[in-house]
Amino acid sequence: MKQEIKERIEKIRNGEVPEGYQKTKVGIIPVEWDIVPTNKVLKTVKKPVNVEPNTEYREIGIRSHGKGIFHKKLVQGKKLGNKRVFWVEDKCFIVNIVFAWEQAVAITSENERGLIASHRFPMYKPKNNLIYLDYLLTFYQSLRGKFQLNLASPGGAGRNKTLGQKEFSQSLIPLPTIYEQIKIVDILSTWDRAIVLKEKLIEMRKEFKKGLMQKLLTGEIRFFGFNDEWNEKKIIDIINYEQPNRFITKNIVDLDKALTPVLTANKSFILGSTFDDNGIYTETPVIIFDDFTINNKYVDFPFKVRSSAIKILKPKSNSINIKFVYELMQIIKFPLGDHKRYYISEYQYVKIKIPKHIEQERIVKVSNNLDSDLTILNKELNQLKEQKKGLTQLLLTGIVRVEVD
C-alpha cells in the first residue's frame, strides 16, 4: 500500500478530513463525489401479472448476505390466491424487503425473464444514467450499504424489520462518476473471479477425495503389499458410544467465550470422569454423533459439549483407527434410503468390512493429506475474501481512487 494511502487512512481514523475530501452524512469521501438518495438514481419497475388459475408460474426468492437469486418450484395460478405478483424484468436492482437488513439484494438477469415476484420484491432500474447497477449492488453488499439498509428497515428483528419504501427512496449513496463506478466494479470483479476459481478448485478436490476414499474404504483399490482379507463386523462390535448424562451447573465460566471449542448447541452436559473440572472432554480423538443431524464430526482436540442429543464414539480396541471408522461412516448406504436423520441405532448394526490396523492407518494417511490440502485451499479462499472486503471498503469510500481512461 502506498504511503499516501496509509497517511490518508490514519487521518480519517483520527477524525481528520484529508485534503481533497469532504465530511458527509455517509462518511468522508472525495470532494468530487456526490451524496444522493436512491430516488434520484433509481426508478421503480412494476408490471402486474394477470394471474390465470390454470397457468403455471415460477416465483423467485433472494438469499440474504448478498448470495443472489434463486428460483422456486412451479406453481399453478390458483394456488397463488390473492397474492399480488409482478413480472420480473432483467437488469433490475431487486430487494427482498423482509430481509433487506440482511443484505437480501440482487440484480436480475436474463435467467429471471418471464418469472414472477411478489410485492415484497420491488425492482428498480437506473435513471438519468447516473448509477451503474453493479456498483449499486456492491455498495449495498458493503458494511456502509448494510448500515443504510438497516436505517431504512425500522422495527424489530426478522419479519418485523421490513424495508420501508419511503425510507429506502431516501437512502443515501456516495456517488462517483459513472465511469469511476464501472472501474471500481471492474477491479473488484478480478477478486470475484479469483474467489470463484478457488471455490471451484475446492469442490473439485472434495469430489476427488470422495471418489478416492470410496474406493479405498471398500477395498476396490489396495496399497501394494496388502493382500489380507477384510473382516466383516457390525459397527457395534468395534465402537463404544457414550451419551451425556449429567448437566453441568458449576465450574463453567464464560462458556461461549472459552478458548476450548464448544461443539453442537443447547445445554452443557458432562460424561463423568472423561470430562475435567472445567467441563472439557479430554480423551480424544473421538467421533461426535448427533441424532438430530446427518453431519458427524471427527474431533482430535479437547472440547466442550452443549447438547444432550449427541453421542461420543470411541474405538473398543487399539486395533481400530477411529478416523478410519469416521470416513467409513460417510459412505454408508442404508437399505431404507436417504433421510434427514440417522440415529445411532441405525448405524450400530450396520455390517462393514474392515482391514487390519496397519492398512487402516495407510488409508487414513491419504485422507489426512487430502484434508490438509483442502485446509490450505480454504485458508487461501478466506484470504481472498478478506482482501476483497478490505479493497471494497477502500474503493467505496474513495480512500483509494481509480484511474479512469
Image (cartoon, rainbow, N blue to C red):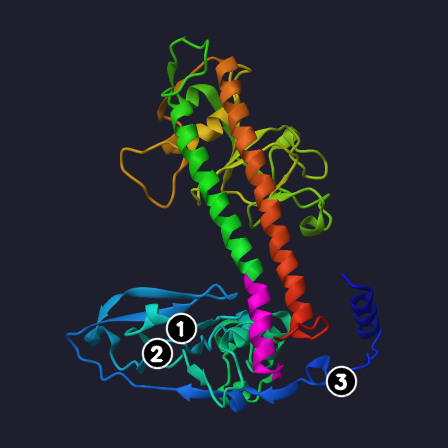
Magenta stretch: residue 174 in it? yes
Image spot of residue 56 (x, y percent): 20, 71
Q: What SS does tag 3 mark?
A: strand
Q: How many marks?
A: 3
Q: Earlier in the sequence, mark 2 or mark 1?
A: 2
Q: Is residue 17 left or right of residue 314?
A: right
Q: Foreground residue, 184 or 363? A: 184
Q: What SS does tag 1 mark?
A: loop
Q: Which residue is mark 3?
A: 22
Q: Earlier in the sequence, mark 3 or mark 1?
A: 3
Image spot of residue 168 (x, y percent): 53, 85
Amino acid marked by disc 3: Gln
| Residue at left offset 38%, top offset 18% | 233
Using the rendered view, name the quadrant where residue 194 is placed: bottom right
Q: Foreground residue, 3 or 142? A: 3
* Residue 108 tag number: 1
Amino acid marked by disc 2: Glu
Q: What SS does tag 2 mark?
A: loop
Q: Dot 3: within a 10 Å radius of its alpha carbon, few (fewer than 14), some, or many (20 or more) residues?
A: some
Q: Is residue 64 left or right of residue 29?
A: left
Q: Are marks 3 and 1 in contact (CB under 8 Å)?
A: no
Where 43 sits versus 270, above or below? Answer: below
Amino acid marked by disc 1: Thr
| Residue at left offset 38%, top offset 10% | 229
Q: Which residue is mark 2?
A: 89
